[in-house]
Amino acid sequence: MLLTNIHEAKTTFSKLVERVMLGEEIIIGKAGKPVAKLISYQEAAPPKRKPGAWKGKVWISPDFDKPDKKLEDLFYHGPLEPSA
């Protein structure tokens, strides 16, 4: 772990990034107090799915996929833009 000040970090930023890429952590301080940590970026794992999480929260009509002549007509033969 390396402790550096803001001015030094600004002037040697690319070198600090190289060190971080090699696994080192860099602490940046202001007036002798740590204010930031430069660490290697880690891709966060996607959250695990929990089966059944939506159970009882969503309702789907039994005839949700029943053909609807008016809706199909509007979709296939309706105007390209809605009227104002």
Image (cartoon, helix red, strand yellow):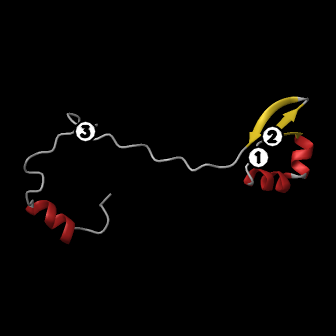
x and y, in percent, of residue 67 in the image: 8, 61
Q: Earlier in the sequence, mark 3 or mark 1?
A: 1
Residue 1 shows which numbered tag?
2
**Distance Cα–Cα, label 2 vs label 3:** 45 Å
Residue at image position (49%, 47%) is 45
In the rendered image, residue 40, in percent from the top left (x then y), is placed at: 69, 48
Q: CA distance from mark 2 to mark 1?
A: 6 Å
Where 26 sits versus 82, above or below? above
Q: Is residue 44 left or right of residue 62?
A: right
Give, as a three-letter code, the residue at label 3: Gly
- Report the front residue among 46 and 78: 46
Question: Which residue has dot 3 on it?
Answer: 52
Which residue, given by chain and number where applicable, does mark 1 sit on?
24
Q: Residues within 10 Å of mark 3 (few under 14, many from 20)?
A: few
Instruction: Look at label 2 and name its amino acid.
Output: Met
- Residue 46, given in percent of the width and then of the height, sits at 46, 47
User: Left or right of 31: which side holds 70?
Assistant: left
Amino acid at pointer 1: Glu
- Between 9 and 65, the one lying in front of the other is 9
Asked if the residue at tag 3 contacts the one at tag 2, i.e. Cβ–Cβ closer than 8 Å, the answer is: no
> Residue 63, position in %: x, y?
7, 51
Q: Nearer the viewer, mark 2 or mark 3?
A: 2
| Quarter of the rendering occupied by the N terminus | top right
* 14 is higher (above) or lower (below) than 31: below
User: Which residue sits at x=92%, y=45%?
Assistant: 8
